[in-house]
Image: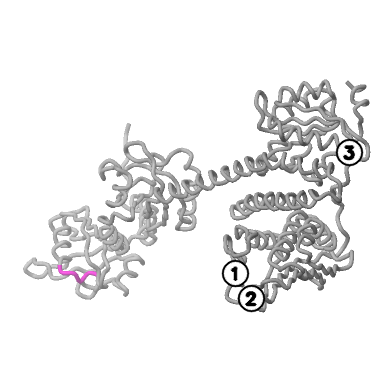
Amino acid sequence: MKVTARSAPAAAAAAEPLRRALEGLFRASDDALAVLRVELDEAGGVRDFVVLEANRRFEQYAGMPVLGKGLGDVPLLAAEQWPDLLADAALDRRPAQVCMAGPQPGSWFEVQLIAAAKPGDRLVGVRMRDITQQRRREEQLQALRHIRTVGVMVWDASFKLADVNDGFLQMSGFAREEVLGKTWQELTPPEFHAVSWNAVRQVLTLGEAVPFEKEYLRKDGSRWWGLFAPRKMGDEAIEFVLDVTERRAAEGALREADRRKDEFLATLAHELRNPLAPIRNGLQILRLATPGEAPARRTLQIMDRQLAHLVHLVDDLLDVARVTAGKVRLDRQVVPVSELLARSLEATQDAIDARKHRLELQAPAEDVLVAGDVDRLIQVFINLLSNAAKYTPTGGLIRVAAAAGDETVRVQVRDNGIGIAPEQQAHVFELFSQVRDHQKHSEGGLGIGLALVRSLVQLQGGSITVHSEGIGRGSTFEVRLPRVHGSASARTAATAPAASAHRILVADDNADAAETLASLLRADGHEVATAANGAEAVQLAMDFRPDVAFIDLGMPVMDGFEAARRIRGQVAGKKMRLVALTGWGQPADRRRTAEAGFDLHLVKPLTTEGLSQALAAPDWQTSPTALQRDA
């Protein structure tokens, strides 16, 4: 193939686009670029170096125009090693790459010197990059290298470890040469990759990530918890980490202790409620069998009040544990204040009458409404009324007054009892706190009632305060609740037991509890059958066909949960009203009974209100005879 040589003008014309492109790159580069020429004296020695070309970045670093200027006229090139380096590159064609201090204190540049293509040109190319920040980082990292309390990791642009300090090596168990070059994926368990990717995205887009916690892998495969805080620094990212393994373990131990405490309280309540159930049922039976004028009637009333006090203490213990753990769930409804006070007074009337107190009630109009959990609000006022009765000498005066404003409703419970010293009033709502002068009273409680009251009021958007003029001058507790304007919402209220008798099944392995409840129900005109375990309960449900079945949960042979599921699995069982009657009353227990098919969850001992709920269901539609026909 024949090649035709180009003329000089044609070759120059062809090279022009390339020259322009290179010139454009020269001008636009982020690096400082310049071309210098060696000026020789008559003896052939180096006289000076003159800047022939320089881009914008070079002049920016120099802080002045530099074209045509000699070495001594440009402060950027004033360091003493410049002449020798330039001469070596220009005359001896020895390129160099060095780090050099800049003209400003603390500034540093990476310098590369490039010899010209033709030996006789006496030209040298200079490329400079400002590495001041990088040097400062290196100095800082050097200072951090031997710190052991904080781990430091330096990640390169591809997020591989470029450097680590002694602290990280101690945390991770690696040697420095073993860990350098590893990616965060190699050091992070798979379940924490998502949170790590999120941190990487934050660093790339925002320059830093919100501190976060995750587990890391040690050299031996074990895990440790770290609190990580990464941020971008130039092309690299630096990440600080604290080993929080001990703190996480302590938190886990606290959670486990809290769980065990909840389990203990629930078990304690269960064990206390089981014997309380037959005692209450027995008292009811004795009351029915004892004439009103009999001397034993007074004893029965005392026993009943003390039993109610014991049940109240058990419930308060559980409630205060739930409140402090944040596990109380409120069933908010709109209710008249007058109804709350009426039901609270009904529950405490016996205690007030037993001490021969005089009660004055000033209730608001029927249309004054508040929103909250009805049972919890009644619990609040029962506590306040019980305290007023307890700490007021016999024959005292208790005043209950409610007043409505535009936004709030105020309810005051005032007594003329033993009062509270001014310095002690600030502490009456603290958990396990008791007023010193109250401790000599034989009926002093555990110091949890008022703490529970305050928590329950605050949970419902209200507040409570106390005021007393001092010892012997009575006390006033004032509850403020947000007022609701409108009408009361429909609620399923406890109604009186159905007038007609029903077939009822009582299943409980505690024979005393089963028999006393059965006797009480029979005295009320109901037909009752009893079962000692879940298997018997299932069989009796099919043979006896009850309207209502009271079923204990912790029975032998078959527990109450499985018994309920099997009864619901039968055609006749679908229409029975199943009531869990148990000593277990935690929210988790109530969820389990609902899932097993129970209609109602009642806690032992069975109260009159609970019995009313069980026997007077609003959706009652079938009789035992109808159930038999459907089967």
Q: Secondary structure at mark 2?
A: loop
- In the image: residue 68, left or right of residue 333: left
The foreground one among 559 and 165 is 559
Q: Secondary structure at mark 3?
A: loop
Q: Position of residue 83 (x, y in %)?
A: 15, 66
Q: Position of residue 56 (x, y in %)?
A: 36, 67
- Give the number of the disc on residue 471: 2
The foreground one among 199 and 537 is 537
User: Looking at the image, do the residues carrying marks 3 and 1 touch, with CB atoms under 8 Å apart?
Assistant: no
- Dot 2, how many residues are within 10 Å of its Cα: few (below 14), some (14-19), or many (20+)? some
Residue 217 seen in this snapshot? yes
Considering every residue shown, the one lying at the far bottom of the view is 469
Which corner quadrant of the image does residue 432 belong to? bottom right
Q: Quadrant of the C terminus?
A: top right
Location of mark 1 (residue):
437
Residue type at mark 3: give it: Asp
Considering every residue shown, the one lying at the far left of the view is 43
Dominant SS in magenta: loop
When the figure is inspected, residue 625 is found, relative to residue 251, above or below; the finding is above
User: Looking at the image, do the residues carrying marks 1 and 2 touch, with CB atoms under 8 Å apart?
Assistant: yes
Location of mark 3 (residue):
619
